[in-house]
Amino acid sequence: MGFIDAFKRWRLARRGLSSGRKRRIHAENLVALTLDRSVWVRLSLFAMFIVVVAVTVFGAASDTNFADDALRGALFGAVIALTAVVVLHTNHEVAAGRNGRIILILGGLAGYLLLVRGISLLVDKSEMPGQMKFLLIPFALIPMIHAVLLGKGIGTFSTVYAALLGALVMPKEDALIFLAVSMVCGLVAVQASYRVRKRVQLLRAGVYAGLASLLLCILFERIDLMPGMADQLEGFKQALWSSLAALGMGILIALLVSGLLPVLEGAFQLTTDISWLELSDLNHKLLRRLQLEAPGTFHHSLVVASLAEAAAESVGANAAMCRVSAYYHDIGKLSKPEYFIENQGDGVENPHNSLTPTMSALIIIAHVKDGVDLAVKHKLNPKVIDIIQEHHGDSLVSYFHRRAQEQKKAELEKVEKGLENPEDLPKIDEKNFRYPGPRPRTRESGIVSLADIVESASRSLKKPTPAKIRTMVEDLVNGRVCDGQLNECALSMRDLAKVKDSFCATLRSMLHTRIDYPKDDERSTLGRKSDLEKRQGGGSKTQPMKPATPPATSPSTSPSPSPSDQPQQRAAS
């Protein structure tokens, strides 16, 4: 079919009826999407996880609490793994709805279990002391990865089950201590690495996890800071190395997570706040083009980004994603920037004046498809492309639709007067004046959509006041709700109330008024009066000037300003 379409475009291009180019579209791989949503694949992943846990616990039973009955240990492992599957499926529906994320979560837990077991085996073959073996375990590794990639909820889930499953493969004397230390270190790492925006914050989270591990090991006497008198120097040396191992493991975990993040983000199609901040660089090629070729649209995008970011923070949505997506949401206007009012300078004729309303609407609507085409070409983040495609939903281009109705009404009056043929009346189809959609499907997409129309409408406000701003925001948001544009995104009425409050607060700060400064001629008049006052009231200390009597016929030279000048002087000061 692709070859046939290309041949048809070639034939049309030879006849001058086509440019020969095909607009790029944003569509997910159907096979990958099917596998990612398949219930049977999900069940297979659940079963595989349970089997891996049971087999690992069975193989480690020789030096654990289940040394006498390995099958009993495998049963314990299978039961705990089953509870993990149930909790994930029932309490974390968003993460459990994608098989790729299930691989990341359950695969991470299974890999952590194998890692703990592998560290135990490697250290057993060496001459390292037992307490060092315990301190080399990366307690916060999986909780930190999951918290950064999937959020605090999944990070807490991983903390609990990493501790429970790891305790099954630890030696009998270390099982309970491992459970406590793993729980605390994991929770500290999750809290410290939630929504990190800089890589140095990951390092700080690793230091905190290392300090927690050190304190608990001292508390549980895994690190002896008070060695006996017999070999005190050796005891202090061992305590020092153990302390450094506890702290160093936390820092090593942070460095490892920082290095793994780009790989995991690409493999599982996830984007962290760190990556969003990297994408917000205004020196991107598309944004540079927007700044040079469509400066009005560029400034509009910056203001929409500020509105959307503040609103997202107020409702707990991804503010960094809203800001980056708002930067790129109108890049489709680069194809015909002069057809958009914000890029039309003073004294330039509006090109829409020579077009029919239907043609003007088609040009305006096309900027969404052109934006998707440019975004796909420059390999922007898929979530940004979704917002470019959804930020107008299937809303109506009301200005040109109303203009078309007015033209039809004028033509109808001519028909009634017998000046026009009824068959020549233009047909107005509302579908031709609606964006192709789809409607916003995420909270962030809905927020950017609302910020876009609010910023555009705010430019038409004359002498904006808080009451006018509030009325405008209420009307625009309620209009989108009544039109059904927000039906598919997860913004509740409470969220919309917070979004409106945020828009009003941001617009009040942007559209604030300033005091009126004196004009140039007024400032020069005030300056002349001030000089005259100095000449008449000042003078040399050795030769004081005699007071001069002002002439009665020239009040304009009076040293004191007229009453009408006093407010201007206060304003100028």
Image (cartoon, rainbow, N blue to C red):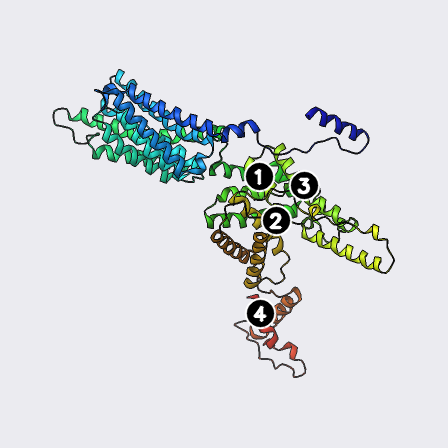
Name the residue beneath numbered marker 3: 334
Name the residue beneath numbered marker 1: 386
**Identity of the residue drawn at 87% across and 58% down:** 418
Q: CA distance from mark 2 to mark 4?
A: 37 Å
Q: Secondary structure at mark 4?
A: helix
The answer to whether the residue labelled 2 contacts the one labelled 4, judged by CB atoms less than 8 Å apart, is no
Q: Secondary structure at mark 1?
A: helix
Q: CA distance from mark 1 to mark 2?
A: 20 Å
Left of 72 or right of it: where is 436?
right
Left of 356 or right of it: where is 253?
left
Q: CA distance from mark 3 to mark 4?
A: 48 Å
Determine crowd level at label 4: few under 14, some 14-19, many 20+ residues with C-alpha closer than 10 A: some
Q: Is residue 532 above or below residue 323?
A: below
Marker disc for residue 300: 2
Q: Amino acid at mark 4?
A: Gln
**Identity of the residue drawn at 67% across and 46% down:** 434
Marker disc for residue 569: 4
Which mark sits nearer the N-terminus, 3 or 4? 3
Looking at the rendering, in which quadrant would you find the N terminus?
Answer: top right
Q: CA distance from mark 1 to mark 4?
A: 55 Å
Q: Position of residue 48 (x, y in %)?
A: 39, 24
